[in-house]
Image (cartoon, grey):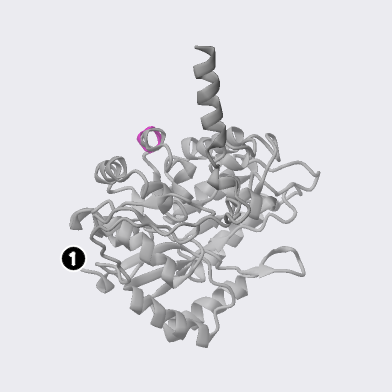
Amino acid sequence: MKSFSLLILAVFVSIPVFAQEDDAPKMDFETYDPESTLVVPEHPVTKAKFPFIDVHSHQWNLSVDGINKLEEEMGELNMGVMVNLSGRGYDRAAGDIGSQEYLASMVRRIAGEAAGRIVVFTNVSFKDIGKEGWTDAAVRQLEEDVAAGARGLKIYKSLGMGINDSEGNRVPVNDPRLDPVWAKCGELGIPVLIHSADPKSFWDPMDEKNERWLELKLRPGRKRSADDPAPWEQIIAEQHDVFQKHPKTTFINAHMGWMANDLGALSKHLDTYPNVNVGIGAVIAELGRQPRFAKAFFEKYQDRILFAKDAYNPQEYYTYFRVLETADEYFPYYKKYHAFWRMYGLDLSDEVLKKVYYKNALRIIPNLDSSLFPE
């Protein structure tokens, strides 16, 4: 028996290990990007089936030429309305959002070139928060911006993650100094689109179990320690506390509240907070890898989901359309570092598509031009 075992070992050792040959190609995970050999029906979509409202875009310094170019691209995508969340722009010299006049002048240019096609949300200036009179000034600024044409309020993720008050303390998302701002949005009938935190994986150990490993390697500035500047769970809980304290204010939780990878948790979230809706910006890759569960979620919460994209790139919309509209299988996402997996279509019904594409936004955002959309 011992002789037989030695013979087997000798044969095994003599077998060449081809993967270790000197002429074998060498690559790392960042480089490896195989083309699928799967042959299945394909239905690429470059234009949405119905006109849609993108409730999450950022456009800086919209000149007349920029507006005209943007409107042309919107037509090619079948985008009826774009919501520019950066209504006040950014004042680099002051290190703060721009002025009310910046917003007002943008509204005037849009009215002259693309009336009804582009609308703007305003932003809160957190400069001097903590000093006497800041809250009253913030509420007054909000009222003036809405009078100047703003249709909603956008809160950046810097709230809770990077903003400190005049004493140097982190300003939490549910800071009581902001309560009058949330309440005023409810009084004015405008929604608050709020982005809090980032994907939880950014806070997790950067090891072989982290799905965002490649993104964190290529974008190391996105990695956070467990409490930098606070635990992920704490920032999210602060956001949810705002929703609970202000039931008369309508909120749009950006990026599906970073729960698109756990639709069961997101279901409980929406059931708990009837004043909250969700935008799908930057999380289509999560939906596209769970088509059956995601389709059931869209059908159940069809009145609470809004189309959103975030970073503006016309060709990237194609993946959103294909995931939402088709039953295609195993097609690529447009950024490997966001999703190294493949997408599957949800094949949503026309009724659900219309709500996600435009009907929900028409109901939530005031004074949009409904004539741009089907009944």
On screen, residue 231 versus residue 116, left or right, reads right
What is the x, y in percent for residue 372?
28, 73
In the rendered image of this protein, does residue 285 appear above or below residue 149? above
- Of 375 and 16, nearer the camera is 16
Say which of 359 and 201 sits in front. 201
Judge the density around disc 1: few (<14), some (14-19), many (≥20) Cα neighbours within 10 Å. Answer: few
Image position of 70 with respect to 3: above or below: below
Residue 25 appears in which quarter of the rendering? bottom right
Camera-side residue: 261 or 114?
261
Q: Which residues are magenta?
A: 268-273
Asked if residue 20 lies left or right of residue 169, the reply is left
Name the magenta segment's main secondary structure. Answer: helix
Q: Which residue is mark 1?
A: 375
Q: Amino acid at mark 1?
A: Glu
- Identity of the residue drawn at 51% across and 71% down: 148
Magenta-colored stretch includes residue 269: yes
Where is residue 14? Give x, y as percent: 55, 36
